[in-house]
């Protein structure tokens, strides 16, 4: 047995024991850091008020603002709502496609085209069912005409491998060149999909805004590959955002029991799932004895035990001076907002900056500079600093 394998086994044993001990406390343990929160940051966090901005009993999966300040909200049960600027009651948008809502599937993320003012395109990810009741993740673009969606077209429909209702992903982001990135989870077939580039699922994809495959995608010359794939070896990415300075695409993804990850997405790179992982099965048994392997990317950050991350935002606003330049991540499991502090392209620590929000589904920085937080069963909160 190699030294690498011995080291990985020792890490795995220690991590498994720690996970069993800490998961009962319901307090996240940040596996990469034991640093405490500075007093100034603690005081700043205590002076943040979470004000309910929009009340809704559904699951607010996605948020996107139109140039006029109106907020579009996707709800996982299949509804799309428009909250006009300055109002508290939203209108329902009709004429959506047939959506396979149920379990983890439904109407998922939303993104407005960077040149929306000129072309009017809005992008959605959603769970789609075929004529055999098999489900997959689809990416659609459409236009908004009054209270209706028009000119709908699916620009990518992943192959449907089964009827399971889990691990659809999915988040959307545009880069500085106007390419559309989106994530699709492994669809619960961890030993089949993530490592196989001839199959959809367990991947991050890149397309032109009209669905065409970019000529420089990493697998365009592989006759059998899914040519929209940009990176692979992912479990279930539910956070995706463009870095405000570099323009790179960053993601986070759910691990199983432990091993939630933050990743910087690179062209053609393999992120390891399920061959390497910092997590274990929900039953406590081992998935793999490897946490690293040549040719597979290490996460920039991982959590053990899991926080169940969902939603992700870079903070650039001067309304939050102690958060600027860092990432905010929502925790479904603990109802928290976690800040990952960055030094360039390295994550150096993570700490809870907001607690007691129940299931945090999404985080976005709005055009007004405020941070908005989608919470399951409650709606969307606006984080307002005092003073």
Image (spheres, rainbow, N blue to C red):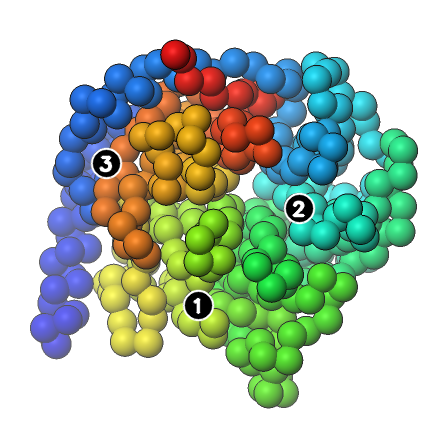
Residue at which label 1 appears:
266
Q: Is residue 311 left or right of residue 48?
A: right
Q: In this view, does 22 lie above or below 13?
A: above
| Residue at image point 61% right, 82% down | 220
Determine whether label 2 and label 3 are within 8 Å by CB: no
Q: Where is residue 205 in the image (x, y as percent from the top left)?
A: 58, 64
Closer-to-camera residue (266/56)? 266
Element marked by disc 3: loop
Camera-side mark, 3 or 1:
1
Q: In this view, does 94 lie to the left or right of 61?
A: right
Element marked by disc 2: strand
Which image quarter holds the N terminus? bottom left
Marked residue nearer the N-terminal end (2 or 3): 3
Tell me, yes or no, if residue 124 can be seen here.
no
| Residue at image point 16% right, 61% down | 9
| Residue at image point 71% right, 62% down | 209
Q: Distance between the residues labelled 3 and 1?
A: 28 Å
Locate residue 377: give its quadrant.
top right
Q: Position of residue 57 (x, y in %)?
A: 64, 19
Which image quarter holds the C terminus? top left
Q: Where is residue 259 in the image (x, y as percent from the top left)?
A: 32, 49
Crowding near the residue tagged with mark 2, few <14, some 14–19, many ≥20 C-alpha atoms within 10 Å:
many
Q: Is residue 14 left or right of residue 56?
A: left
Residue at which label 2 appears:
111
Instruction: Name the disc covering residue 29, or none.
Output: 3
Marked residue nearer the N-terminal end (1 or 2): 2
Tell me, yes or no, if residue 160 can be seen here.
yes
């Amino acid at each position: 047995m190699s030294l690498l394998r011995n080291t990985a086994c020792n890490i795995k044993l220690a991590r498994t024991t720690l996970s069993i001990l800490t998961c009962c406390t319901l307090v996240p343990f940040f596996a990469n850091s034991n640093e405490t929160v500075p007093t100034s940051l603690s005081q700043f966090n205590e002076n943040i008020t979470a004000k309910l901005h929009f009340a809704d009993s559904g699951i607010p999966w996605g948020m996107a603002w139109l140039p006029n300040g109106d907020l579009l909200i996707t709800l996982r049960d299949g509804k799309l709502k428009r909250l006009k600027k300055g109002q508290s009651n939203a209108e329902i948008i009709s004429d959506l496609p047939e959506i396979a809502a149920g379990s983890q599937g439904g109407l998922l993320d939303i993104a407005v085209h960077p040149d929306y003012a000129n072309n009017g395109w809005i992008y959605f990810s959603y769970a789609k069912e075929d004529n055999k009741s098999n489900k997959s993740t689809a990416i659609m673009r459409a236009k908004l005409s009054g209270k209706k969606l028009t000119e709908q077209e699916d620009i990518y429909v992943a192959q449907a491998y089964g009827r399971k209702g889990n691990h659809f992903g999915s988040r959307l982001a545009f880069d500085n060149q106007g390419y559309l990135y989106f994530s699709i989870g492994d669809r619960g077939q961890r030993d089949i999909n993530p490592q196989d580039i001839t199959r959809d699922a367990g991947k991050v994809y890149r397309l032109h805004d009209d669905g065409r495959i970019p000529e420089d995608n990493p697998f365009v010359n592989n006759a059998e590959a899914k040519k929209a794939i940009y990176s692979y070896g992912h479990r279930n990415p539910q956070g995706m955002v463009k870095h405000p300075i570099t323009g790179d695409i960053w993601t986070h993804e759910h691990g199983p029991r432990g091993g939630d990850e933050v990743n910087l997405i690179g062209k053609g790179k393999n992120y390891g799932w399920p061959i390497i992982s910092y997590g274990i099965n929900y039953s406590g048994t081992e998935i793999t004895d490897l946490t690293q392997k040549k040719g597979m990317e290490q996460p920039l950050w991982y959590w053990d035990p899991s926080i169940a991350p969902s939603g992700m935002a870079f903070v650039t606003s001067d309304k939050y001076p102690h958060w600027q330049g860092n990432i905010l991540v929502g925790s479904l499991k603990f109802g928290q907002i976690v800040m990952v502090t960055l030094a360039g392209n390295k994550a150096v620590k993570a700490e809870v900056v907001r607690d007691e929000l129940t299931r945090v589904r999404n985080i976005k920085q709005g055009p007004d500079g405020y941070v908005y937080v989608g919470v399951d069963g409650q709606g969307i909160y606006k984080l307002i600093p005092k003073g």
